[in-house]
């Protein structure tokens, strides 16, 4: 399990989130991501990004007044059927 603090990126954390999911988490590893919610649409956008990337969103919750936390498990490569 790894923790990633993306709060310093403000609303521009999506590219970094995608990069971490793609390159920095091992298969089946869980990542905890903390980001600042300046726009609540970013909560849904982050969930959509996780789904689009083929990973599993395990939890999404408000951490405090301005910060949000998502917990993501990186999935193994899917076998083509």
Image (spheres, rainbow, N blue to C red):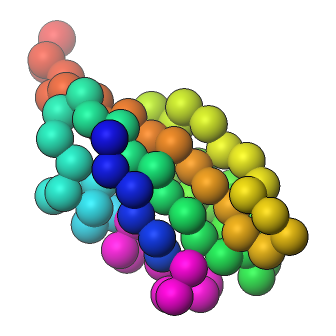
Query: From the image, which quarter does the N terminus lie in?
Result: top left
Residue 38 falls in which quadrant of the image? bottom right
The foreground one among 47 and 32 is 32
- State whether residue 18 is above or below residue 78: below
Q: Residue at x 50, y 87 (%)?
A: 9
Q: Is residue 40 left or right of residue 69?
A: right
Residue 66 falls in which quadrant of the image? bottom right
Q: Is residue 7 left or right of residue 68?
A: left
Residue 15, given in percent of the width and then of the height, sits at 37, 75
Q: Is residue 35 visible?
A: yes
- State whether residue 2 is above or below residue 58: below
Spot the residue most to the top: 81
Residue 72, given in percent of the width and then of the height, sits at 45, 41
Residue 40 falls in which quadrant of the image? bottom right
Predominant secondary structure, magenta span: helix
The foreground one among 15 and 3 is 3
Q: Residue at x 40, y 64 (%)?
A: 4
Residue range of the region highlighted in magenta in the rendering: 7-17
User: Magenta span has 12?
Assistant: yes
The foreground one among 49 and 60 is 60
Residue 57, given in percent of the width and then of the height, sits at 52, 36
Q: Is residue 50 visible?
A: no
Q: Is residue 5 left or right of residue 30?
A: right
Q: Count the marks.
A: 0
- State whether residue 30 is above or below residue 53: above
Q: Residue at x 60, y 84 (%)?
A: 11
Residue 30, given in percent of the width and then of the height, sits at 35, 38
Query: From the image, which quarter does the C terminus lie in?
Result: top left
Q: Residue at x 56, y 79 (%)?
A: 7
User: Magenta span has 8?
Assistant: yes
């Amino acid at each position: 399990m790894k923790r990633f603090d993306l709060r310093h990126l403000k609303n521009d954390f999506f590219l970094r989130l995608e990069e971490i999911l793609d390159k920095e988490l091992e298969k089946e590893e869980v990542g905890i991501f903390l980001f600042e919610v300046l726009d609540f649409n970013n909560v849904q956008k982050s969930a959509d990004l996780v789904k689009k990337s083929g990973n599993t969103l395990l939890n999404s919750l408000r951490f405090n007044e301005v910060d949000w936390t998502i917990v993501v498990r990186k999935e193994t490569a899917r076998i083509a059927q």
